[in-house]
Image: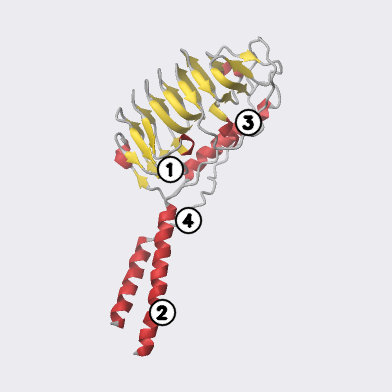
Amino acid sequence: MNKESNICKNIIPVLLSLLILALAAGTASAAQAPVDLGTAGNFVIMSKTGISTTGTTSIVGDIGVSPAAGSYITGFSLIADASNKFSTSSLVTGKVYAANYAPPTPSTMTTAVSDMQTAYNDAAGRTSPTETEKGAGNIGGMTLTPGLYKWGTGVKIPVGGVTLSGNANDVWIFQIAQDLTVDNGAKVTLSGGAQAKNIFWQVAGQTTLGTTSDFKGIILSKTLISMNTGATLNGRALAQTAVTLNANAITAPSSSVTPTNTPTVTSTTTGVVTGTQTNPAVTSTSAPAPTNKVPGFDFTLGIALLSVTYLFGKKRR
């Protein structure tokens, strides 16, 4: 009997320790690593087929297109730099790049577009979501904590808006299988220190930001990103087709990557950028990047451990 008692004394702490470790692993699994944007993180707006604006738009950060040419950036009254490596616009506090500008811009843009596609695939490939089909696709009025949210449908943010609550290091990833629609006047509110640079909206369809809406985060869109009149964005608009603007304000969030080899030349001239469209090859990577997640807590394992602990304790008594 003493021998059995000693075995119980020894095994129960072990089982309890395993249970605690399993629970800790389950908590850790909810945390997501940020999506690595690579050199795409050097741009506040990037598109493969064009960027257009009407009205008085204000952009803080660099913008670019590839494989489209500079002629597919419309409404900005572009002014060519003497080097023809970039251009400027009164609407952009930053520089404007296109695939047909002078080297090294074409290769720089090809890499940035490839990085954008890799980032999209990474976000789309994350597994073990925190929640699925939240609100049946309508997240109006909700407060969402950090994690991975997945929908097999579109997502709508109505006029009541949505709040993202977490600290400065927390990450949100939204996997949306269809369109993302933000209603007129709707707002994404950040609380608790949450940062726009750590919020990733992976959209397989089209993204539409309604009139005067206020949006936060990095938009990784498979197709069009459309910003209606007066909509604002604190984040990035990275589209695999086009970006259309209408009197919008777009500001890059605090940098989530170390700036890399974006061309820099200081001299300017008054010539307007022209040129025929070029189509440098863009390499797309389909495999998602590793997420560095800890294996989650297995509920069945936890129940089994608790049951064994209980039985040994009962036998001991």
Q: Give the CA distance from mark 3 to mark 4.
A: 34 Å
Q: Which residue position is annotated with label 4?
A: 294
Q: Is residue 292 left or right of residue 16?
A: right
> Closer to us: mark 3 or mark 1?
1
Q: Quadrant of residue 203?
A: top left
Q: Which residue position is annotated with label 1?
A: 167
Q: Give the CA distance from mark 1 to mark 4.
A: 20 Å
Q: Earlier in the sequence, mark 1 or mark 4?
A: 1
Q: Is residue 169 left or right of residue 109?
A: left
Residues at discs 2 and 4 in contact (Cβ within 8 Å): no
Q: Relative to 271, does residue 112 appear above or below in the rendering?
A: below
Q: Secondary structure at mark 4?
A: loop
> Closer to us: mark 2 or mark 1?
1
The amino acid type found where label 3 is placed reads Thr
The amino acid type found where label 2 is placed reads Asn
Q: Which residue position is annotated with label 2?
A: 10
> Closer to us: mark 2 or mark 3?
2
Q: Is residue 281 visible?
A: no
Q: Give the CA distance from mark 2 to mark 1.
A: 41 Å
The N terminus appears in which quarter of the rendering? Answer: bottom left
Q: Which residue position is annotated with label 3?
A: 110
